[in-house]
Each structure stands twice: as structure tokens, then as C-alpha cells.
Image (cartoon, coloured by chain):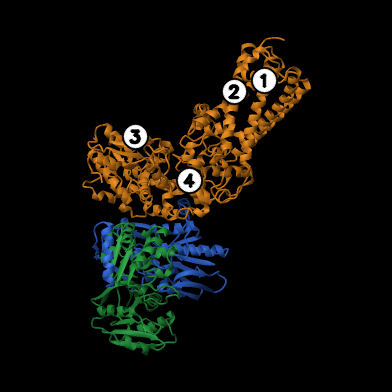
């Protein structure tokens, strides 16, 4: 036999057999294309963002997408082992697929043209790499299979509400196993094929397929060689080939679709997701036809991994919301071509209103699904239909009438300045270096007024030229937008922008991360005369003052504390280190909670939930789930902090956190064990302006 | 030339109402040299003459009519006739549901001026001056009536009419602990209810809690609820809006607890504490536990 | 079924107050304006009756300056069919009889089946306007209504109304009638700001108040001022001290 490293494609097959195979391939590819076409049409019936899916934006994001997908950056989040295993499956499958393509090129293009290359060194390396690829893929699949068999809570797809389990959902686990087994089968039969082929006569160059070679030796040891091996090989070939073709044809219709929808969803993900909610459609989503194409794609990209389900603070406190289930329920509706109103038939209003818009789900999703904007737009649809959550109605009304969510007279806004022994400049009447946008809670919530005054004193001590808007300031509207009264938000933004347009300032300062988020990310697109980078949070600003020597921590506090990253500052806007550096400079040692930085656990106030006083009735939720950490998110968080051992302070950098954690520390019975400190208060003590209580 | 004050007496189930007494004292401030006349409109007006013979009353008119209890149409017709004949300088009534049904219509038909919820009145150079409050009691206005006859109504605290059967009559309590919006949530109501029982005091509430269904109607204190005059009224987390105050301001000792130092309850309370009501409740639980 | 609803754009006063130069009114800068809470319930009731009866018209009327049209716009956004304003400044100071006269004039020729007003306004709280409107129209009036049963077919309505002390009276009143509506009768529907902005495009008919002859017997506000306030004796100290003082007061009261 010729000892050149190569093998015959379609070895031992009659021409008619090859024809059948090519025929089946065409059918398979045809089905695949048809399936893809159907999907494209489905995404196109969604409301276009511009005229069509913005191809330019997608191309621009290609570099970013390639990086995220190829390094598995989002899949590795939270579990290195899962990332590794999936990389094995991913690259293994990719390499094996590439191998088939190379083979096709060799057989159908190169050889007829006399340019055959699939032999010699090339063949040897090809064999080795594909063996390794196959092994990697099988290793990853076995890891996933074992993990699933051991049982993971989030993979049992239990519902968190009382809605019936749909037939499709009842099949989720089964479908998952079929997918896993199909790939295992393909991988295993691939090796078997190689082993049988080599077992025929054990050519020496085939050691370049080490694993197959090893199996071949085993086969020969039990007497399978020569003609027998050849016959078995032919049979196995067909089984392998048909299943592969079947797999390819099934891709648009099964979980395998995530191979394409996953990276595409990553590519079309809004770079400012959640920070800046979509301006359109202003009336939100009532039907699937209203969905932006990217969101329709998102529904098909979900791999049911359940990470969002796990990290969601609403779910973990017994509310009937699981971001995973929102996506999957919508997906099933989309598959059935559901044309009716999505709420309440597909998604319950209670589910939507449970969301704190904290972005934990968005941050952890490996394929970049935009759960928060989807929920927000569905909320918008409800508000547009005159059905905001009942506790929100008086709040929206109060904001309309008085410009603040407390319903207090506008004149009360600057009341907190009265107890200062100096006059705060009026930014409406004179130019200032720093325009301090105080915000509702910092101005009017009694617990926060103390911190706001402390900040004013700090700024004065540091010689900062700052002013406020007095009664002309209205709530920035970040939470009004998250609670989905879009019209009210636009109106607030327009009025605030008008007020600020008459002022002269270099930067905008705020101690409120919610105001920070919208002033920085959303107002510039609505006509503001400032750019986002000119908006600064007080934790960063105070650090700046310290680094510049304008504030001196002459009284290092010598305490141990933990710092709670506010959702709107940390996860939304990536500001993690500056508050920590500031805290350290105050002489406080930071002990991190398990869930810190972008894994921070929401206090429960976001998304307008701080205004929704009546908790969603627990009766709505299944009792078993309600037992798991069904305490309010803020109480769960305090328990997490207490678990770190003896701490002096629980440090926050957000006025809503002050309100939530003040309550939580009392309700959880830990008032003796830990003290709540806001950053201004901390700095105030560290620079000797106030004494520790 | 109009002169003299006409008082419209109110009666219910054979008794002259308390409000008529108050209206008479207001009338005395106005009458000057004129006469103070009370009109008794009833099936048998003579039954009320004794009760209506109050100090300062110069004349009692008896108007027999074909109705046993109050009937707006009949009252208006009768009063129209009296006004046309006597041309009083002012007609006074109680600020009650019956008064409000009669007053404005009489003013329109008899061509009189009108004001409701008047806190004080006086005569100046033949012109009637009245004072009433606006904006929830925060500001007061002095009203001047151009011409002669004028119709005024005074605020009252309504006598409790009918306790529905099987329900508690909180107006008989000695010490009342009342809760308002400051209580926050339904769960907290139960806590305070338990405390009230331990302290041996009667629980009451302002209207919002009753509207929300957290407290039964018979515990409601205020204009549209029950009027109470206990020896001590403890108001927790109640802002002191006038609709509520109307129902309890005659209490002997009023103690208000509210986080907001500007809350109007502190204007009507004898003792006040600016504090978190939950802290105070916790401390009371320790003392009375 | 034609229902006319009278509404008012009311101002809420905070803790500070300044008066106008003539000292006869509150400086509007110190007021936060909104649709009167009682009137919101009235318009909501009217809309529900119209929708339940499957047809009919709801017309909304107010007296005031240009700003008061915001009350009408809000009602139109809620679903009212038409709006009318009687142009007049100085609404808070206009006495309720004059208001009734103006509102009745605005309804001339409309042939309403039912007229709804709020039982009182949050700023003036006279509680008399509805009655006055009824007197000028010659309709019967039932005040402080908590429930309405009326479908426009029979010439009467059955209503529940509040007397003092928690007692409710059931009254049959012949229509057309004026009913003044108490809060709690319903939960007014929410309207988005977007809906309000769209409704603000609608046309509102304006009538001049001067065309309605003024009666001589109304009142004039001479002056407005902040009344002297009684002050409570403050109990200072910790919650513990407060609780102790309260306990002592209770014991003294019982002694």
C-alpha cells in the first residue's frame, strides 16, 4: 500500500452511494437555509430601529464580538471550569467542522483541478489537530453531562410563579439531553470511524491520530481488523454522516441555534445597554410585532443557562420574576407566532413590576441578552395602556405636580440648606465651577439630608466653587424612566435641560448614582448642552479632591468596613475602584462581600420598586421557592455583610441605599452589630469636620 | 334696612342639636342692637321651644311643617318666606350635611350672599364680616359682604348618630390611641392594635387607613367618621389635617407624635413629640409589655 | 346619556406662604397645582357610567384663567369628549354662589342628564358649589355621594350619600340632578404624560365671565393672612423619654 500519509475520501463507496450522500447533504443544507430564512423573516417583522438591521453597527462591533466570543469572556464569567469546558466543545466543534470543509474543498475542488493538498505533512497535522479537537469536544460534553446529571437548581426550569408549565417547557430538559447526546454521538462515532478505518491495516502514519490509533489497536486486539473493520466502518460512516447532516438541518429549529444566535446577539448588543434605555419605541412593547429586531434575536439566543435566574434579586426574595423565564416565555410565544397582547397572557404584570432594573441579569448573560430593556419596554406598553403598577400612580402624579417623588412642595427642595451656617450659591443666578444636582432623596429624605449637609460642608472646606438649582431642580427622572412613564421622563428631562441651559458650569456633581446615570448617559442624547464625561459622582470627586491635596484625611478612622456597590454606579457605569480608594484614604480597611463590584446584589430600590410599598403577594409565588432567601434583598445583603465577621461600617454611596439599608439593619436585628455610613459622612469624619457617633 | 340675625335650628329625632347652641353664640357676636331670632321648623316646633330658649335669644319662631325629620325642600321654602318677610342682616346655620343642602340653594333663591365653614364673624358699620380658612387651614381670609342679608355657616363637630349594630362605639372611650398614614403598612397596624390592647386604650384611625381597608370604619375619627372627646387623645403619625382634627379637637388632652416638625397636629395638640412613631411604639411596648 | 362634570385646578400650599401685593390672595409661586382630588373621582365616575351605558357624552367645565385649562386637558386625556372654560381670574376668591352661577351659565342649552361636581375642593373646601349650580339650574342636588346607580334610561338615579358619623343614606333623586361626589367612590384612572400632551391639542370653548351678570350679594376678600397658630408643648428627649411621658399623661387622664 502507498505509505503517503493520506486516505481516500469515500473509501470503498460506490458512485451511487456518493450521490446519495451528496443528495442528502443538499437536503440538509436546504433545510438549514430554509430554517434560517424563516428566522430572518421573523426578526424583520419587528419594528426596525432605522430602516433595517444596522449592518454598519454590526460590522463596527465585529472586532469586539470576535474578542468576546473567541476568548469566551462572557461564558467564563462566574465559572472558569464552565468556560474551559465550553471552549473545548466550541473549538472542538469548530475544528471538526473546518476539517469537513477542508475535506470538501480537497475532494470537490482541489483534486479535480489537480491541486490536491490533503496528504503528507498536511495530512499528519490535520489528523493530529482533529483528534485533539474531537477529544476536547468530548471532554467538554462529558463535563456538562455529568454536571447536569448531578442536578443544578437552575437547570430544572422550575417556574417562580403560579403559571402552568407549557408543553414546550416540559420538554426543555429532554431537549437539552437530546442536544448533548447528539453531539456526544457525533464525536464518539467520529472517533470510532477513525479507529475502524485504522484498524483495517494499521498504517504507521496514522499515529498522527493518536486516540483513534489507540482505539484501533484495541479493536485489533479483539479481532476486529481487515475486512470486518472495513464493513463496520462503512456502516458507522453512514450512521455518523446521516446524524451529522440531520444535526445541521436541525440547527435553526433546536438549541443548536445558539451557535449562530449567540454570537450574533453578542454582536448586536447595545453598548450602552440599560445605561441608556432605548428612546424608541416610546410607547413600548405591547405585541411581539413591536419588538426591536435585536430583541427578537435575543429571544432565540437564550441557551437556558439560568445564570440570570440565579443572580436576580427579585427571584431570590420570592417575587414572581425570573429573567430567564421572561425570555423563554416570550420565545415560545414568538415560535408559535403569537399575535395578541403579551401582557398578561405571556408575561404577568406582577412579573414585570417585580424587576429592580439592577442589570445583574444583563451583566451575567453569556450571549448578551438585553433582559432589562425588554422588561422596561414591556412596562412602557403597560403604562401607555393606562396600567402602571397601582402604587406608582400617585408617585407619577406627585412628580407631575411637584417635580419630586415625595409630593412635597417644590419650595421644600432646598430646605436642607437652612441648617448650614453658610449660604449655598444659586447656580441659576451666577456661574459656578461645579453644579451640584442634588436629587430627590438627597434633598428631601430626612435620613439623607444629614449626608447632603455633610457633603456641602466638605465641598466648602475644600474650597470648591459649587452651586445648586434650589427649587428649579426637578427629579432627574432616572427611576421614572425605569418605572416606564416615558412621557413623564422626557418632560422632566426637557425641563431640567432647559433650566441647566441657562446656567454656566464646568461640571455636574451628584451624590445620587441614579441621577448620575441619566444625566451622564441619557440627557446628552435628549438635547443637553453638556457631554456625559462632565458628570461626576461625589465618590470620584471627593477622591479627586483628596488626591489633589484639597482635602486632608487628618483623622484616619482606623475601622473595618464593607462597601456596597450601588447598581447604578457600579454595574451600570463601571465605577468600582474610586469609592474604594476614597474609603481607604479615610483610614478604613475594606473587607469585600462575596458579591462585590459587578456582582453586587441590588438593595431592592431600583426600577421604581422603592415606590412600590406593597410587596408582591408571596401567595403568588410557589411556597418552596419563597423559602429560599425570601427576605427582602436589602436584608439578605445585610446578612451577607454580617457573615464577614465583625465589621464597624456598612458603607454606601447612594441615597436610596441609605434609606433601604437603614431599614434593613433595623429589621434584621443587627443594629448593634453594624453601622450604616454614607461616603460623605465618612469623609466628613476623616477630615475632622464631624465626630464619629 | 335689614337687621337682626336669624338662626336656623337643627334637630334630630326629637332633640335639638348641639350645633345650634354654637350657632347661637356666633349670632350673639353679630346681633348688635338687633334681635336674635331662632326658627324652629318641625312637625311640632313647640317641643323644642324650651331647649331653644338659650341666653341671648330674643325671639323664637315656630314653623309647623309636614315632615318629621329634615327635608331640604321644606326648609328652603319656609326660610325663603321668613327671609322675605323679616329681611335679616344675616342667616346662620350649622355646617352640617343638612346645612349644606339648604344653605347655597336658599342663598340663590333668596338672593343672599354665602360663605361656609366660617370660624368667626362680626358686624362692622352695618356690614357683616366673616373669617374662613383656605388651603387646609394654613391661611385665613377676611370676607366682606356687600349688601344686607348674608348667609353663614359654622363648622361643627357632628354628634354621633347611629353606631351600626355590633360595632364598637369609640366615642365613649376615655383614652384613644389613633394612627395615621405614618403607620406605613398594614402589618404595622396589627402591631399597634396589640399594643393598644395591652395599654387598655381604644384604637382609632384617620380616614386614609379606613379607605385602604386596614382598619374598620367604626374606628375612623374625623369629619366623615366619628367625633370623640376623650380624656386623652394620642395621635401617632397623623398629620393633623382639618378633616381629622374636626373629629377630635375637643379632647381634653391631645398628644401628637409625628416626624415632621411642621405637621399641623402640633397646632392643635397640647403636647407634641417630633419623633419616629415606631421608636415611640417600641418604647411603649417595653413600658406596657 | 349626557353628563357634565365641573372641575377645578387647585393649588396645594406647602409650609411657606407669601401673599399677592394686594394681600388678598396667595402668591401662585407658592402653590403646586393639580386637578382637584374630588373632581378626579367625579370625572372618573362620569366616564365609567358613559362606558357602561355604551354611549353618551361627557363634557367637562371649569372656571378660571388660562392655567385652569390644564384641569380640562387632564380630563380630556382621561376620556372626556368636550371641554368648556369660563374665563375668569381670581378663582379661589370667587364665592361659591358666583361660581355656581358661572358654571350653570356654561351649561346653558346642553340638556344634561346628570351634573357631577366634587364634594369640595382641596384648597377652598367650601363644599357649596355643587349645591349652588343645582339651585341656578333648578335641579335637585344630593351632596357627598359615595355610589351612583344610573343608566340614563329612567328619569331617576339611586345614590348613596354620606351623612356624618359613618351613616350612609340611600336616596332616589329624579334626574336631571346635580350630585357632588365624595372621594373613595372609585380609583381615578392613570393618564400618561404623553396622553396629556396629546389631549392639549384639543379645542376648548371659552366663555367670558363678564357675559354673566354679577349678583350684588357676593362677598369680597378684604385680606388674607396667616392665622396665629397654637403650639403644642414639646416633649424632648429620646423615644424612651417620650414613651414615659405619654404613659404618665395617660395615667393622669385616667385618675
Determine the secondary structure under disc 1.
helix
Work out how far the residue at label 1 is from the one at label 4, CA to CA, in angstroms: 52 Å
Closer to the observer: label 1 or label 2? 1
Left/right of residue A255 with respect to residue B73 in the rendered view: right
Mark carried by residue B33? none
Closer to the observer: label 3 or label 2? 2
Q: Colour of chain B?
A: green
Chain hosting mark 4: A
Contact check, label 1 and label 2, Cβ < 8 Å: no
Chain hosting mark 3: A
Count numbered badges in the picture.
Answer: 4
Closer to the observer: label 1 or label 4? 1
Of residue C54 and residue A618, the one placed in the foreground of this image is A618
Mark carried by residue A133? 2
Q: Colour of chain C?
A: blue
Mark before the other along the chain sequence, 1 or 2:
2
To the question of a shared chain for discs 3 and 4, the answer is yes
* Residue behind mark 3: A578
Determine the secondary structure under disc 2.
helix
Contact check, label 4 and label 2, Cβ < 8 Å: no
* Residue behind mark 1: A218
Chain hosting mark 1: A
Determine the secondary structure under disc 3.
helix
To the question of a shared chain for discs 4 and 2, the answer is yes
Mark carried by residue A316? 4
Amino acid at each position: 500500500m502507498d505509505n503517503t500519509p493520506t486516505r481516500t475520501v469515500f473509501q470503498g463507496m460506490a458512485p451511487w452511494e456518493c450521490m446519495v450522500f451528496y443528495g442528502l447533504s443538499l437536503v440538509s443544507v436546504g433545510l438549514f437555509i430554509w430554517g434560517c430564512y424563516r428566522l430572518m423573516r421573523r426578526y424583520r417583522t419587528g419594528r426596525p430601529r432605522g430602516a433595517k438591521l444596522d449592518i454598519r453597527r454590526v460590522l463596527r462591533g465585529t472586532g469586539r464580538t470576535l474578542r468576546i466570543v473567541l476568548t469566551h469572556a462572557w461564558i467564563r464569567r462566574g465559572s472558569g471550569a464552565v468556560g474551559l469546558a465550553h471552549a473545548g466543545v466550541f473549538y472542538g466543534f469548530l475544528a471538526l467542522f473546518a476539517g469537513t470543509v477542508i475535506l470538501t474543498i480537497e475532494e470537490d475542488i482541489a483534486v479535480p483541478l489537480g491541486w490536491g493538498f490533503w496528504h503528507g505533512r498536511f495530512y499528519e497535522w490535520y489528523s493530529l489537530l482533529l483528534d485533539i479537537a474531537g477529544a476536547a469536544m468530548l471532554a467538554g460534553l462529558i463535563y456538562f453531562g455529568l454536571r447536569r446529571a448531578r442536578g443544578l437548581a437552575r437547570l430544572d426550569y422550575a417556574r417562580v410563579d403560579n403559571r402552568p408549565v407549557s408543553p414546550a417547557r416540559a420538554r426543555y430538559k429532554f431537549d437539552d439531553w437530546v442536544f448533548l447526546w447528539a453531539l456526544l454521538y457525533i464525536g464518539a462515532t467520529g472517533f470510532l470511524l477513525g479507529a475502524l478505518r485504522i484498524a483495517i491495516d494499521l498504517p504507521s502514519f496514522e499515529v498522527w491520530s493518536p486516540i483513534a490509533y489507540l482505539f484501533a489497536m484495541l479493536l485489533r486486539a479483539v479481532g476486529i481488523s481487515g475486512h470486518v473493520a472495513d464493513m463496520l466502518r462503512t456502516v458507522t460512516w453512514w450512521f455518523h454522516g446521516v446524524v451529522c447532516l440531520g444535526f445541521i438541518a436541525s440547527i435553526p429549529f433546536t438549541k443548536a441555534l445558539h451557535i449562530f444566535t449567540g454570537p450574533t446577539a453578542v454582536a448586536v448588543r447595545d453598548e450602552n445597554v440599560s445605561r441608556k434605555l432605548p428612546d424608541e419605541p416610546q410607547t413600548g412593547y405591547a405585541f411581539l410585532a413591536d419588538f426591536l429586531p435585536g430583541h427578537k434575536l435575543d429571544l432565540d439566543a437564550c441557551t437556558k443557562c439560568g445564570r440570570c435566574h440565579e443572580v436576580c434579586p427579585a427571584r431570590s426574595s420570592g417575587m414572581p420574576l425570573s429573567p430567564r423565564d421572561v425570555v423563554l416565555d416570550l420565545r415560545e410565544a414568538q415560535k408559535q407566532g403569537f399575535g395578541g397582547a403579551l401582557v398578561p397572557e405571556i408575561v404577568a404584570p406582577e412579573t414585570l413590576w417585580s424587576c429592580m432594573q439592577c442589570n445583574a441579569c444583563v451583566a451575567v448573560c453569556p450571549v448578551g441578552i438585553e433582559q432589562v430593556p425588554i422588561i422596561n419596554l414591556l412596562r412602557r406598553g403597560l403604562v401607555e395602556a393606562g396600567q402602571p403598577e397601582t402604587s406608582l400612580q400617585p408617585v407619577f402624579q406627585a412628580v407631575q405636580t411637584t417635580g419630586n417623588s415625595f409630593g412635597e412642595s417644590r419650595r421644600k427642595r432646598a430646605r436642607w440648606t437652612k441648617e448650614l451656617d453658610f449660604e449655598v450659591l444659586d447656580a441659576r443666578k451666577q456661574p459656578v465651577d461645579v453644579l451640584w444636582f442634588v436629587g430627590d432623596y438627597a434633598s428631601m429624605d430626612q435620613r439623607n439630608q444629614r449626608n447632603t449637609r455633610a457633603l456641602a460642608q466638605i465641598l466648602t472646606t475644600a474650597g470648591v466653587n459649587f452651586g445648586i438649582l434650589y427649587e428649579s431642580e426637578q427629579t432627574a427622572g432616572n427611576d421614572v424612566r425605569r418605572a416606564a412613564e416615558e412621557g413623564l421622563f422626557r418632560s422632566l428631562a426637557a425641563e431640567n435641560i432647559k433650566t441647566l441651559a441657562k446656567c454656566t458650569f464646568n461640571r455636574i456633581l451628584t451624590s445620587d448614582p441614579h441621577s448620575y446615570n441619566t444625566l451622564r448617559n441619557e440627557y446628552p442624547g435628549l438635547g443637553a448642552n453638556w457631554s456625559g464625561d462632565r458628570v461626576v459622582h461625589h465618590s470620584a470627586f471627593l477622591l479627586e479632591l483628596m488626591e489633589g491635596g484639597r482635602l486632608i484625611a487628618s483623622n484616619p478612622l482606623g475601622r473595618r468596613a464593607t462597601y456596597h456597590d450601588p447598581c447604578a454606579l457600579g454595574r451600570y457605569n463601571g465605577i468600582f475602584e474610586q469609592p474604594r480608594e476614597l474609603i481607604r484614604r479615610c483610614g478604613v480597611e475594606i473587607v469585600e462581600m462575596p458579591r462585590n463590584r459587578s456582582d453586587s446584589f441590588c438593595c431592592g430600590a431600583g426600577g421604581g420598586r422603592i415606590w412600590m410599598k406593597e410587596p408582591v403577594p408571596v401567595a403568588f409565588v410557589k411556597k418552596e421557592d419563597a423559602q429560599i432567601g425570601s427576605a427582602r434583598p436589602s436584608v439578605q445583603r445585610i446578612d451577607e455583610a454580617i457573615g464577614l465577621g465583625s465589621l464597624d461600617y456598612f458603607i454606601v454611596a447612594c441615597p436610596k441605599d441609605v434609606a433601604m439599608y437603614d431599614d434593613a439593619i433595623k429589621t434584621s436585628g443587627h443594629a448593634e452589630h453594624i453601622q450604616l455610613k454614607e461616603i460623605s459622612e465618612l469623609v466628613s469624619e476623616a477630615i475632622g469636620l464631624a465626630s464619629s457617633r | 334696612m335689614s337687621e337682626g340675625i336669624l338662626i336656623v335650628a337643627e334637630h334630630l329625632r326629637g332633640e335639638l342639636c348641639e350645633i345650634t347652641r354654637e350657632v347661637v353664640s356666633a349670632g350673639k357676636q353679630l346681633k348688635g342692637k338687633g334681635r336674635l331670632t331662632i326658627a324652629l321648623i318641625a312637625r311640632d316646633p313647640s317641643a323644642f321651644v324650651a331647649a331653644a330658649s338659650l341666653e341671648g335669644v330674643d325671639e323664637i319662631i315656630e314653623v309647623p311643617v309636614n315632615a318629621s325629620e329634615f327635608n331640604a325642600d321644606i326648609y328652603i321654602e319656609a326660610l325663603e318666606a321668613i327671609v322675605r318677610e323679616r329681611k335679616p342682616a344675616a342667616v346662620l346655620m350649622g355646617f352640617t350635611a343638612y346645612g349644606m343642602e339648604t344653605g347655597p340653594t336658599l342663598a340663590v333663591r333668596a338672593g343672599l350672599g354665602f360663605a361656609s365653614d366660617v370660624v368667626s364673624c362680626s358686624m362692622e358699620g352695618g356690614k357683616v364680616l366673616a373669617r374662613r380658612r383656605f388651603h387646609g387651614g394654613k391661611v385665613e381670609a377676611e370676607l366682606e359682604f356687600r349688601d344686607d342679608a348674608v348667609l353663614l355657616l359654622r363648622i361643627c363637630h357632628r354628634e354621633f348618630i347611629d353606631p351600626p349594630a355590633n360595632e364598637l362605639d369609640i366615642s365613649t372611650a376615655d383614652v384613644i390611641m389613633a394612627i395615621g398614614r405614618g403607620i406605613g403598612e398594614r402589618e404595622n397596624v396589627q402591631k399597634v392594635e396589640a399594643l393598644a390592647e395591652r395599654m387598655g386604650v381604644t384604637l382609632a384611625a384617620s380616614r386614609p387607613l379606613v379607605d385602604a381597608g386596614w382598619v374598620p370604619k367604626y374606628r375612623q375619627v374625623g369629619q366623615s367618621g366619628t367625633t370623640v372627646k376623650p380624656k386623652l387623645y394620642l395621635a401617632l403619625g397623623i398629620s393633623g389635617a382639618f378633616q381629622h382634627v374636626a373629629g377630635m379637637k375637643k379632647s381634653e388632652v391631645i398628644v401628637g407624635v409625628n416626624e415632621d416638625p411642621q405637621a399641623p397636629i402640633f397646632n392643635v395638640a397640647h403636647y407634641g413629640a417630633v419623633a419616629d412613631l415606631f421608636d415611640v411604639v417600641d418604647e411603649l411596648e417595653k413600658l406596657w409589655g | 346619556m349626557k353628563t357634565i362634570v365641573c372641575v377645578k385646578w387647585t393649588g396645594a400650599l406647602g409650609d411657606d406662604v407669601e401673599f399677592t401685593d394686594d394681600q388678598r390672595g396667595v402668591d401662585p409661586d407658592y402653590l403646586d397645582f393639580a386637578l382637584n382630588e374630588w373632581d378626579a373621582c367625579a370625572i372618573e365616575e362620569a366616564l365609567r357610567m358613559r362606558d357602561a351605558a355604551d354611549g353618551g357624552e361627557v363634557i367637562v367645565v371649569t372656571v378660571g384663567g388660562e392655567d385652569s385649562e390644564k384641569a380640562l386637558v387632564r380630563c380630556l386625556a382621561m376620556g372626556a369628549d368636550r371641554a368648556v372654560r369660563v374665563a375668569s381670574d381670581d378663582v379661589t376668591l370667587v364665592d361659591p354662589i358666583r361660581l355656581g352661577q358661572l358654571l350653570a351659565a356654561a351649561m346653558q342649552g346642553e340638556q344634561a342628564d346628570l351634573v357631577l361636581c366634587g364634594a369640595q375642593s382641596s384648597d377652598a373646601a367650601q363644599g357649596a358649589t355643587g349645591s349652588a349650580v343645582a339651585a341656578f339650574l333648578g335641579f335637585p342636588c344630593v351632596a357627598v355621594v359615595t355610589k351612583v346607580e344610573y343608566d340614563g334610561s329612567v328619569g331617576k338615579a339611586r345614590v348613596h350619600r354620606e351623612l356624618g358619623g359613618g351613616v350612609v343614606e340611600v336616596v332616589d333623586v329624579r334626574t336631571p340632578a346635580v350630585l357632588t361626589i365624595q372621594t373613595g367612590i372609585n380609583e381615578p384612572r392613570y393618564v400618561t404624560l404623553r396622553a396629556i400632551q396629546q389631549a392639549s391639542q384639543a379645542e376648548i370653548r371659552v366663555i367670558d365671565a363678564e357675559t354673566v351678570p354679577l349678583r350684588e350679594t357676593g362677598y369680597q376678600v378684604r385680606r388674607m393672612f396667616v392665622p396665629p397658630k397654637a403650639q403644642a408643648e414639646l416633649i424632648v428627649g429620646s423615644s424612651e423619654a417620650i414613651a414615659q411621658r405619654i404613659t404618665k399623661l395617660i395615667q393622669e387622664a385616667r385618675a
